Image (cartoon, grey):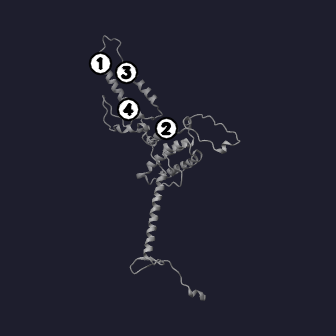
Amino acid sequence: MTSPRHPWQNHYRSFSVCSSRTKSGQITRKGFEDSYAYHHSRQRQAANKARQAELKQQRAAALGDPIRGITTPFMESLDSQLPPQAMASVQEVSYTTDAPSSDQPPPSPANAAEEAHLNYYLTKPELQDSLDYSRLLSEPLVSTDRDRADPVKEAKETQAHEAGHKIAFEAVSRIVSLANATSKERTRANVQRIIDTFGRHKTDTYLKPKAPSLQSTYSTIAEQKPTPRAGPDTGSSEVQIGILTAKIRVLADRYEGANRNDKANKRNLRLLLHRRQKLLKYMHKKERGSQRWTNMVEKLGLTEATWKGQIAVE
């Protein structure tokens, strides 16, 4: 049994704001009797949405890429294993693989002579000393009896020895070149380069630390002397951020293209990004405005998107 209706309920109608279709087929909203005002408001709404989308794109472009950041000469040198000053001459090196000859060896596929770091933990002076010593051991013997010596034969032997040494030098240069190394070996060399570039055992000699704050200046607590460094700096924030950036670039290159469905790589990339974001937030809080922060951001090409907001790997 329904309840009786009150007398005041019969004097009011339910109000609806739903749209209705007119005779011309256009959908209009009740309450907008003026079609000009309705269409004018729709145009303003569309213009506002377009402007909001444009501003959103500008803000995203200003923040930069949260994964790669901005490409800098130092980061390009990590990919090519060449120092930044030698990047221009790389294009002049031939990449042909002709058969070696005794008189002229083929050009090297990588500028091994200009590489700052070599494979197998070798240095350029060590490599040069070893090649000079091998050249000395393989030189043809000179006859002590000069009356019976054949100068033509000795000249041919010397010429053959020089050609063989050139071929051996080219072969060893290819072997120790990081351009022919595995990804693991290139990453190890990049880590060493980052330690040499951003380690405080070297940067403290030409980069000034951040100025002390007023709170620490007027503090009554005695300032503690820093512990003497026992070796290369491998644990400072800028070094760890540089190492993570190099590893992120390697994983990002593998994840792009045909490996988009690699879930394990995607998870590892996300973990490294979030770890770098935490370190960047910490260093931005402690070293913001200092020469250490400016040097790290400029060389690694890091933008605000790498430590601000949410980082999503799609």
Amino acid carrying label 3: it is Glu
Sequence-wise first label, 2 or 1: 1
Q: Tell me the distance, in whole angstroms, between the alpha carbons under discs 2 and 4.
A: 25 Å
Nearest to the observer: residue 205 or residue 165: 205
Q: Are marks 4 and 1 in contact (CB under 8 Å)?
A: no
Amino acid carrying label 1: it is Lys
Residue drawn where x is 36% and y is 26% of the image: 165
Residue identifier under label 4: 171
Give me the disc on residue 65.
Answer: none
Residue identifier under label 3: 139
Nearest to the observer: residue 228 or residue 129: 228
Badge 4 density bin: few <14, some 14–19, many ≥20, Cα 10 Å: some
Q: Which quarter of the figure is the N terminus placed in?
A: bottom right
Sequence-wise first label, 2 or 4: 4
Residue identifier under label 1: 153
The x and y percentages for residue 226 are 64, 37
Q: Tell me the distance, in whole angstroms, between the alpha carbons under discs 3 and 2.
A: 37 Å
Residue identifier under label 2: 193
Residue drawn where x is 37% and y is 29% of the image: 168
Q: Are marks 3 and 1 in contact (CB under 8 Å)?
A: no
